[in-house]
């Protein structure tokens, strides 16, 4: 009996309470900063925003639960409470990882029908793990409490970790698989979310008695929140491209960059968008704008910065070493548009009127540069309307 009591005391001694309070307290403060920064009711938010805030609330709950599980560890009068708290902690961990996959998928495809088609099946591992957690209240599955109410890992303790990492790995693989079809700005925030989560969970897995998991998740959520704010300021919701404000900032920050070449811009205007709106409605017109953005993204890639300049106008900002590079880019854009028009069965065609020019920052203002390529674009449009071929 004396040996068992010593083992129980040793179990409590392994817990580093100051670290637990500081880590989880810091995590809660970080998440409260996010919640106090909400600018509109959640019911009016987009699906990705709602999922994000669900993850924030779950993480706050996890911080309190984790503190509670360590405080009741070794206190026999709280045995039932300990079992319930740990079961909820494990369940919420898996739920949070599952929601992070849905978040990543929606950021990629913005398709609610896809979410409904794929993710009920993807929920099976989470549901089975949660069932195991509930069963754990009655019989050891993932963890057990000894006669001194000390937490111990059970035979299947690895399963919640495996399921959690399965969902995180799925997010990374999903993004990597579609890396050619998405915008670069999505990579960094997703990996900034994943990296602290992985580090925190590994540290907590290797060093029992310390609390790093939920601080890591909080840091990841803060990075996602910063990304959401950047999107609100600089990203066009309809196309996912940078907006006019971002372009203005980009041009205003332009300086001499000898190794990068000469700055240049290509202005593109969707032909006959008014006709598309009049014939098929503004919903189809918005679809045409969105598709035009995707066509341009396929063509431009990482060779320039692509922005939606106005309603049906786009600008490609790039650095060139010769005029041929502009012409090559224009040819590539026309080729991508032709591929869409030939392969897709849409009630409309996507074609562009195109203007271009270099930005002589020492001799012209930003407005002068934009007016110059705008005039060039309207010359192209006039030639088309007059029925002549345009070769620039």
Image: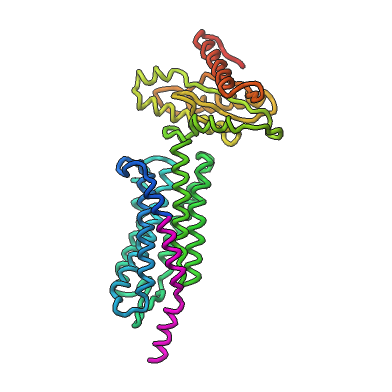
Image quadrant containing the N terminus: bottom left
Between 227 and 275, the one lying in front of the other is 227
Start-end of magenta stretch: 1-29
Image quadrant containing the C terminus: top right
Q: Residue at x 65, y 23 (%)?
A: 360
Give residue 207's position: percent from left, percent from top: 49, 71
Q: Is residue 192 left or right of residue 264?
A: left
Residue 113 in view: no
Between 299 and 248, the one lying in front of the other is 248
Magenta segment's dominant SS is helix
Residue found at the very far bottom of the displayed protein: 2
Give residue 293's position: percent from left, percent from top: 48, 30
Colour convention of the picture: rainbow
Q: Residue at x 53, y 28 (%)?
A: 336
Residue 244 in view: yes
Give residue 195's position: percent from left, percent from top: 52, 56
Assess whether residue 348 is covered by the magenta stretch. no
Give residue 244's position: percent from left, percent from top: 49, 29
Q: Residue at x 39, y 61 (%)?
A: 93
Q: Is residue 210 depicted above or below 103 in this figure?
A: below
Between 130 and 317, the one lying in front of the other is 317
Assess whether residue 7 is covered by the magenta stretch. yes
């Amino acid at each position: 009996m004396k040996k068992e009591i010593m083992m129980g005391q040793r179990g409590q001694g392994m817990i580093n309470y100051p670290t637990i309070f500081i880590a989880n307290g810091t995590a809660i403060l970080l998440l409260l900063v996010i919640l106090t920064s909400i600018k509109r009711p959640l019911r009016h938010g987009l699906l990705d925003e709602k999922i994000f805030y669900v993850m924030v609330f779950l993480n706050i709950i996890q911080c309190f639960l984790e503190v509670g599980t360590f405080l009741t560890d070794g206190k026999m009068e709280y045995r039932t409470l300990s079992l319930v708290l740990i079961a909820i902690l494990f369940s919420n961990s898996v739920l949070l990882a599952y929601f992070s996959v849905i978040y990543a998928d929606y950021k990629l495809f913005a398709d609610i029908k896809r979410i409904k088609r794929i993710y009920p099946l993807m929920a099976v591992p989470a549901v089975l793990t949660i069932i195991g957690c509930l069963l754990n209240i009655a019989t050891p599955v993932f963890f057990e409490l000894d006669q001194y109410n000390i937490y111990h890992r059970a035979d299947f303790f690895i399963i919640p970790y495996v399921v959690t990492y399965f969902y995180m790995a799925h997010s990374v693989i999903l993004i990597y698989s579609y890396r050619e079809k998405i915008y670069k700005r999505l990579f960094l925030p997703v990996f900034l979310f994943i990296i602290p989560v992985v580090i925190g969970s590994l540290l907590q897995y290797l060093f029992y008695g310390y609390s790093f998991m939920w601080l890591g998740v909080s840091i990841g959520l803060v990075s996602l929140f910063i990304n959401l704010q950047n999107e609100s300021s600089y990203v066009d919701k309809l196309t996912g491209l940078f907006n006019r404000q971002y372009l203005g900032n980009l041009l205003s920050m332009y300086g001499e960059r000898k190794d990068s070449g000469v700055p240049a811009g290509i202005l593109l205007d969707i032909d006959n968008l008014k006709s598309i709106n009049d014939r098929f409605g503004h919903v189809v017109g918005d679809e045409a704008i969105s598709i035009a953005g995707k066509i341009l993204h396929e063509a431009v890639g990482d060779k320039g910065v692509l922005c939606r300049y106005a309603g049906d106008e786009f600008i490609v900002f790039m650095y060139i070493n010769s005029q041929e590079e502009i012409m090559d880019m224009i040819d590539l854009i026309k080729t991508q548009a032709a591929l869409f028009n030939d392969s897709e069965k849409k009630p409309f065609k996507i074609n562009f009127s195109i203007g271009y020019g270099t930005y002589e920052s020492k001799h012209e203002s930003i407005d002068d540069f934009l007016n110059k390529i705008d005039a060039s674009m309207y010359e192209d449009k006039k030639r088309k309307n007059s029925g002549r071929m345009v070769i620039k």
